[in-house]
Image (cartoon, coloured by chain):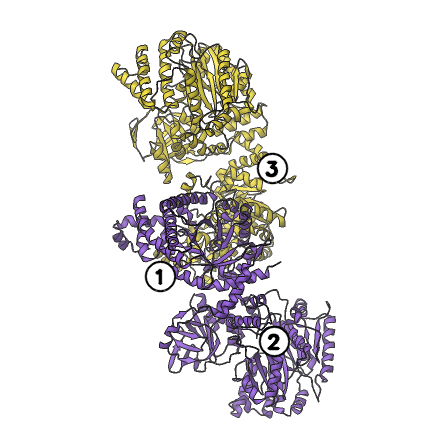
Chain colours: A yellow, B purple
Amino acid sequence: MDKKNVYFFGSGKAEGSTSMKNLLGGKGANLAEMTNLNIPVPPGFTISTKVCKIYSEKNHSYPEDVKKEIESNIVKLEKETNKKFGDPKDPLLVSVRSGAAISMPGMMDTVLNLGLNSTSVVALGQISGNPRFAWDSYRRFIQMFGDVVMGVSHSLFEDKLTSIKNFHNYDLDTELNVDDLKELVNLYKEVYKDNTGESFPEDPLVQLWAAIGAVFGSWNNERAVKYRTINKIDGLIGTAVNVQSMVFGNFGDDSGTGVCFSRDPATGDNYFYGEYLMNAQGEDVVAGIRTPQKLSTLESENPQLYKELLDVKQTLENHYKDMQDMEFTIERGKLFLLQTRNGKRTGQAAVKVAVDLVSEGLIDKETAIMRVTPDQLDQLLHPMIDPTTLNSLKAVATGLNASPGAACGEIVFTPEDAEAKALEGRNVLLVRRETSPEDIGGMNAAEGILTATGGMTSHAAVVARGMGKPCVAGCKAVEISGKAMKIGNNYFKEGDTITIDGSSGNVYSGKCILVYPKLTDQLEIFLKWSDEVRESATRDGVKKGFDVRANADLPEDAKRAREFGAVGIGLCRTEHMFFDEAKLEHFRRMIVADSLSERVEALETIKDLQISDFKGIFKVMDGLPVTIRLLDPPLHEFVPGDEFDSLAKMLHKDVSELKLRIESLKEQNPMLGHRGCRLGITYPEIYDMQIEAIIRGAIFCQREGIKVFPEIMIPLVGTVNELKILRERSEIIITRLFDELKDSVPYKIGTMIEIPRAALTADKIAEYADFFSFGTNDLTQMTFGYSRDDVGSFVPEYLSKKILQNDPFQVLDEEGVGQLVITAVNKGRSVKSDLKMSICGEHGGEAKSIDFVYRSGLNLVSCSPFRVPLARLAGAQSVIRNRT
Amino acid sequence: MDKKNVYFFGSGKAEGSTSMKNLLGGKGANLAEMTNLNIPVPPGFTISTKVCKIYSEKNHSYPEDVKKEIESNIVKLEKETNKKFGDPKDPLLVSVRSGAAISMPGMMDTVLNLGLNSTSVVALGQISGNPRFAWDSYRRFIQMFGDVVMGVSHSLFEDKLTSIKNFHNYDLDTELNVDDLKELVNLYKEVYKDNTGESFPEDPLVQLWAAIGAVFGSWNNERAVKYRTINKIDGLIGTAVNVQSMVFGNFGDDSGTGVCFSRDPATGDNYFYGEYLMNAQGEDVVAGIRTPQKLSTLESENPQLYKELLDVKQTLENHYKDMQDMEFTIERGKLFLLQTRNGKRTGQAAVKVAVDLVSEGLIDKETAIMRVTPDQLDQLLHPMIDPTTLNSLKAVATGLNASPGAACGEIVFTPEDAEAKALEGRNVLLVRRETSPEDIGGMNAAEGILTATGGMTSHAAVVARGMGKPCVAGCKAVEISGKAMKIGNNYFKEGDTITIDGSSGNVYSGKCILVYPKLTDQLEIFLKWSDEVRESATRDGVKKGFDVRANADLPEDAKRAREFGAVGIGLCRTEHMFFDEAKLEHFRRMIVADSLSERVEALETIKDLQISDFKGIFKVMDGLPVTIRLLDPPLHEFVPGDEFDSLAKMLHKDVSELKLRIESLKEQNPMLGHRGCRLGITYPEIYDMQIEAIIRGAIFCQREGIKVFPEIMIPLVGTVNELKILRERSEIIITRLFDELKDSVPYKIGTMIEIPRAALTADKIAEYADFFSFGTNDLTQMTFGYSRDDVGSFVPEYLSKKILQNDPFQVLDEEGVGQLVITAVNKGRSVKSDLKMSICGEHGGEAKSIDFVYRSGLNLVSCSPFRVPLARLAGAQSVIRNRT
């Protein structure tokens, strides 16, 4: 087993199986599995990924035993098919395709029709009864082989094609007759020889070895590497190579080729979804050059064949217990399956399929949970065009609704422009005639993609769905000319803004109002399952749960958070309340106060307003905990940079004195300055006011029958004494208020862990904290020594040079920052074994980070309301994944 | 033993000894020790520090057994002295004095002449044959008891004294006769009764219990607490109380009192140094009201007594093996010792005494090393007035050279003003008629102290020497009036600048030029001993040494560092070189370059200049290693804030474009921005130039016969990949240069550990580092989240509220930052067991921090040249202290 490198499949029997994906790649493993399932698959063999690794390590050569093993499989294939390479009567023709363990559509090389030479082309003509097809296949093979294997530019061949067409005054390729194609073959061979110094190889075995090497080599081509980077694919050793006997969808009108999905990959609806083209080869469908037909046409035109395909679909879906993406070819009325794999799908489809498969009894709930990626869920919450505005909107065009969600941005016409402008922080929409694998970078940078040609399974559509980007494909009204386009009578140039709706296929001029959708019933069911899993989470054998809360500062945010399933507010930033116009004036008056009494007076006014703020939030969160962070940012954030005059007038102060006071608040490094609990210590009256407002608000609500659970959070603690002093002071105020109001509410006082020193001394700090909340934004800033506002000057370069694997502000840095988190968890729990811990940085809404904090023993994550569903799922997956 | 609370001494036998300092305080332990040494000491007993603790814990009361033990010692003392409290013939009079394990001169309370009442005062008059003395003692006792024990304001008594003097038209206290004093006693008793509601106690035992309680209570008075804070005295449980029978230096002309040192406390010279006053009590000497006589006068006037004192001195110095500070009283021709302790001394004296005691065979070298505190050594390097300017300077006055070193500053006249202005960052000189214990805070805040009265052992002189502050005392020419003073014909008001020279006693108008002295021969010897100890330092049984290097950026700094004993440069900051005028222009040109080629061109010019910089340093450091840190600060530090026009003109650039470019360099938090190796990664040409300059400079020097050991240090590394990339790039350049120059030099490439993440991932980083240097300034900033430039707004309050024990930028925070240091040491050494590690932050010159880093396993410290001697000593002390 260990020494085996090549796996044969044919005649209902295969050496491989679907469990050998790492070795055979997804395609190879599934070809073997399908063979074993007695599904009609053209025979062939798979050279394992191990050989890819050896091949690149051995400087593009094979060990002798591997070479022999491949040779013996070639012989076996000839026997199986009863054909011979280069046979003048019945030549064996094969495809040579890549296939890694994780699908990388279109990224690596493929060679078709291999085995054609000046002898076999004649035979193919005779067998097919279509010499034109044979010669067209031959010229395509030379071009493909020249391009893929020998690196001869595609365009050199295209030039010859164009010159012949021009000479004969042809418009279409199809006008070329057999003699034209024979002439073209000769011209192609000349191009080949001129550019490689060798004649085009006649010997099919020479062709085969070269093609296998080229496919292995394509593992490390630029676009494949880039694709793996963008999709964070690592840990693979290489691609497998599948050598498979050819079947032809272009043998005539009784032949054809198609792509189908066992369910709708956009919606997840359970109907047999697919497209096909008669008398065509597979790439004609994928490339989106001809517009394909729906499977329903096949059903009516060839019910027998359709039934056969339907059976295959059912067999495969039942076998794999997941939605399948299949490629098939009909050769002279006979059906062949060329590929099956779990189908890529939109987030909506992923949820629908997972929920349906559970109700169909094919999978259980936890399997369903693992079937939807957090990113897919995120897609569901992508913006859509505000439905209330739709009546007044008029689409300038409609294309295919290729990937859901709406996007607006400045249009760009090249992937390079997309990347460049996105780097400048602009939102761009990439408009292309059709996309190709080289465009990956630009597609990733764009908010959305609009193409002029191509179907629902075109490159643009497949890739956009995978990325979760809105995409409108095949929008025929779009006419591109350089860096401008015309849609009907509307002209757009680069930089103009448009909006696309990937759910409807509509394209709008200008910027539309986007809104976020609510959760569907299906999604609700699915997320409830996730909640059950998280609720059942244990630590050290004891049920602890793993909750999701939201970061929300205002009642409307809190409301949305609750709708999205948050079981509390994990971070309510009180400072955002001060930017409210009613409070800002008094807050500024407080900041520039000349005396304590003036400051206290201003705070009195703010207090009443702040009480209403808290009431609003408590009301919305009735029955759920609300963690309120006391004032955090430095005071200078609240004062104007230049409107001294108006401020002075408003506050009845001298302008120059005011300037001086505001100037004195400026800091060299405000991130590391006078903020958080440092303000609480030096201006105790501010926190006093906030504590009072929280408690008065809570008691007021409680008297109205609302269940309140305020949790007071002290930010930026670095030494235990800060927390000790502020906690003691708060408790005095709270006790005084309880006495005064003759009433009480349950409350907690905890702290942020966001300063490295707090993490390092968490055992001391835990003594005065009812809970910890990790502020991983600041913790990342200080642990890395990166100012989040300033990293733009070097972090992009760090990412491209692989100095950093991820932006540490997006994905929590487990290696460095993670150590501090774990230290704080362990030290905190060494003092209070049940200390409740959460994370409320941006990382709380990112799946990898959620997994890390779950493994670290945190009890809950808090994230922005829109990320709550994602976090509910990601948390459940962490629980399942990390069960021992 | 455990249950004993009171220790008796008398008749050549004492229950205590000098080893019981923690229990008996320094004074009590030494009184016991002297008694056992048969030195004449008035008998008495010491109530231990344990009782102080119990007394404050038990809310100012004693447990019954303690009370009984004190009572039985009172009885014993009456027997020993053959006197009785309140006896109408021969009454027992005692002093009640505080005495903690660490001397706190003048900070706590003392009551003298206790036991006097309306009966015993008469007896004292008869025994002494001097009723005036007896009544004067009585009225002083009432005043002292009223003030110290009952809290009746001193001035209320003084008012009565003044009124009697005015009534009789007396100028001096000495003009009061017995009747006047009797009347005064009555007036004092009225004051006492009016303010306490009780009659002045007649019963000596009542007096005694009250006095003991008062002394215990004074442990926690405000000034004692402040003194302990300033002097960082902690871990003591309280003060002991010494109850000792009185002897009188004011029984007449055959009586007297004095203070003497076994060697000169200012210079350390081995001669018997002291001052005394005949017919006086001890406080008359200390308070500096009468000007005392030198001991040489005693030698000529009473050779027998002088000889006796000389013998005592010799006995004590031989016994304690250290310079002694003694208090004595002569009562009617008989000598009594009231106190001995190791004498406070200047840094110069400390070194001289330590070295002399070694050559006298009294102590060994390591004992000598432990006898000098690092702070004392620091004093030696305090500024002095440039000797070359002395001829042109004319002192406006001369006082006593009470504490060495020169200081200049704006004059202030109150300790409050001193503290307030120092907080504003101004250098102030405190001018006082005489200082008192309440002035401690202001003295600490001032650069130096000038007093109008008082001798070499006055409060100002003693405290200033302890603090290492320059002090000119007893400068009679100074006449103070409110917030102004007159010296001769010169008038000075608050805020005017003067200079004092505490070494000569001179006072100068205005600001003099100050210079730093060189090391004395004595100090050289002493520091060589320290070097030997550090060289012998072992880790895990293997000799590792513990070196001191200096931070020096320019050849002249390096030269001074070498003179001060640095064995290398631990930090040469190349950016300081760029501020040099010749380079700054080109450096700015480089920064605002529009293209790589323009930048490289500017760097070419800088390179040549930088090569000379390095040559200069290598030359001075011939044979010693030089650690050169590549460019660290963000580029915007090098460009002007406003002189765009002139810069644009110079660089032939458009002003607005230049502004834009410079604007784009600005950062929100430059401390956490684009600096250090982040610049090295994004502008590799800068580090390339620096590497080339270092290597070319080194090879040039080597060819001139200079031994060079360049160590290239890469700053601000946070991830191993930064170091890996920069190291690999540097090595390519170095190899290329070695090839080109057909020569090579030994070199190392290491990194700063100054980002928390670097410490946390030090195992990874160690793989690419030849050495680590801890940049504890930045590490402290990021671990605490404190911007060093901005902490002024809250850290002073944090220190006063004891949230922080020390300013973490002065003393390395062992609890937090220290954890990261230890983590990095352990992780680094887990990969390279012999990885050389150093510290080059400000902490490298601070004794406590040096001790910590030695314990943590670092190999060397690097500090500013002036701190090198201190570090050499502190390092040796750490080695001795931490030997297992």
A47 and B561: which is toward the camera: B561
Q: Are marks 1 and 2 on the same chain?
A: no
Badge 1 marks a residue whose secondary structure is helix
Residue B641 placement (x, y as % from top left): 33, 55
User: Label 3 marks which chain's residue?
Assistant: A
Badge 2 marks a residue whose secondary structure is helix
Classify 10 Å Cα crowding around label 3: few (below 14), some (14-19), many (20 and above): some
A93 and A210: which is toward the camera: A210
Circle 1: residue type: Ser
Q: What number is the disc on residue B650?
A: none
In the rendered structure, which disc, 1 or 3, sits on the residue that comes first in sequence? 3
Query: How far apart are the alpha carbons under marks 3 and 2?
Result: 77 Å
The residue mark sitting in front, 1 or 2, is: 2
What residue is shown with label 1?
A: A656
Q: Quadrant of residue A284?
A: top left
Circle 3: residue type: Glu
Q: Quadrant of residue B390?
A: bottom left
- Quadrant that contains the N terminus of chain B: bottom right
In this image, B316 relative to B838: left or right?
Answer: right
Q: What number is the disc on residue B317?
A: 2
What residue is shown with label 3?
A: A535
Query: How far apart are the alpha carbons under marks 1 and 2?
Result: 66 Å
Residue B276 placement (x, y as % from top left): 56, 84
Query: How far apart are the alpha carbons under marks 1 and 3?
Result: 59 Å
Q: Are marks 1 and 3 on the same chain?
A: yes
User: Label 1 marks which chain's residue?
Assistant: A
Q: Is residue B215 above or below residue A722?
A: below
Residue A53 placement (x, y as % from top left): 49, 28
Q: Are the residues at dot 1 and dot 3 in contact (C-beta closer than 8 Å)? A: no
Q: Is residue A638 above or below residue A314?
A: below
Classify 10 Å Cα crowding around label 1: few (below 14), some (14-19), many (20 and above): few
Residue A127 placement (x, y as % from top left): 41, 7
